[in-house]
Amino acid sequence: MQFGDLKFRFHWVPTLLLALPIPLFVVLGIWQLDRAEQKREQTRLLSGRAQLPPFELNSLVDDPEGLRFRALQARGAYDAEGQILIENRRQNNRTGFHVITPLHVVGSEIRVLVNRGWIPAGEDGSPPPAPVPDGEITVTGMTHIPAPPALVLHGGMDAAQDWGTRWPYLTVDLYAAAKGFPIQPVVILLDKDAPDGFQRTWPREMPKEGMHIGYAIQWFAFALIALVLWLRLSLVRETEKEIVA
């Protein structure tokens, strides 16, 4: 194959090093584009859920993931004895606590945990009072499914038994194991305008496809670079060929 004064000469070494990985780079790029489309579909799904009316939390939920980004509603009375504080929560460059209060759902033994917001820590690190209202109320807010931190140092589901009312983090399973009564597998993030709460700035993290688009561009760029290098090493000028001969 001739390209002006350049002639294609097949070489096994550059082909093995460069040409063969090209399909792999292309496949990885396509895979990242597919992941981006999956994130877009998740965003459309979650945005649609946010427009639905609040889901009534009466019986125990079987599929908590199906409620992610869905508004929730429950009626009952707050259980002051079950209230805990989650330590080292930062807001406005200050350290404080999230106030987690169980709501005893009316007509059942079920509790649903309600995050009533953030309170600042005092100068000595202690929390200010977080009073719990009396009486039956209706609570509305967004779904939250708490997860443990990446590094967990405790030794199992019984670790929370010794944490008292100040916890380093929260999962519903840990709370259920510590308290012993049925708990909904989701937490309600109390609406910003609802009474009986504290400072509330709830982030709403939607799936983002931008990262996957960036990775796809990188993989396609690697494929293009490998193709250019392979062609460069495979094309020889006629004068070069004559000198080699």
Image: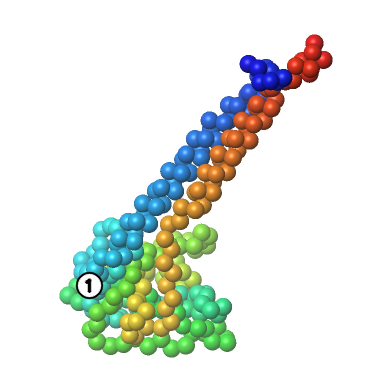
Vertical relation: 207 (above or below) 126:
above
Residue 90 in the image: x percent, y percent? 52, 75
Outermost residue on the left side: it is 107
In the image, residue 66 lies at what x, y percent?
29, 58
Query: Is residue 78 visible to the viewer in this orientation of the structure?
Result: yes
Q: Residue at x 65, y 26 (%)?
A: 231
| Residue 61 position in % (x across, y down) | 25, 62
**Which residue is the extreme one toward the front?**
4
Which residue occupies the foreground of this view, 187 or 73? 73
Residue visible at 25% across and 69% down in the picture: 54
Q: Residue at x 29, y 75 (%)?
A: 140
Q: Amino acid at mark 1?
A: Glu
Q: Secondary structure at mark 1?
A: loop
Residue located beneath label 1 in the image: 109
Q: Is 229 left or right of 54, judged from the image as shown?
A: right
In this rendering, does residue 111 appear at all? no
Which quadrant would residue 225 be assigned to in this image? Answer: top right
Q: Crowding at label 1, few (<14), some or many (≥20) Cα neighbours within 10 Å?
A: few
15 or 128: which is nearer to us?
A: 15
Q: Is residue 118 above or below residue 212?
A: below
240 displayed left or right of 125: right
Give the quadrant of residue 236: top right
- Where residue 193 appears, as percent x and y from the top left, is 34, 82
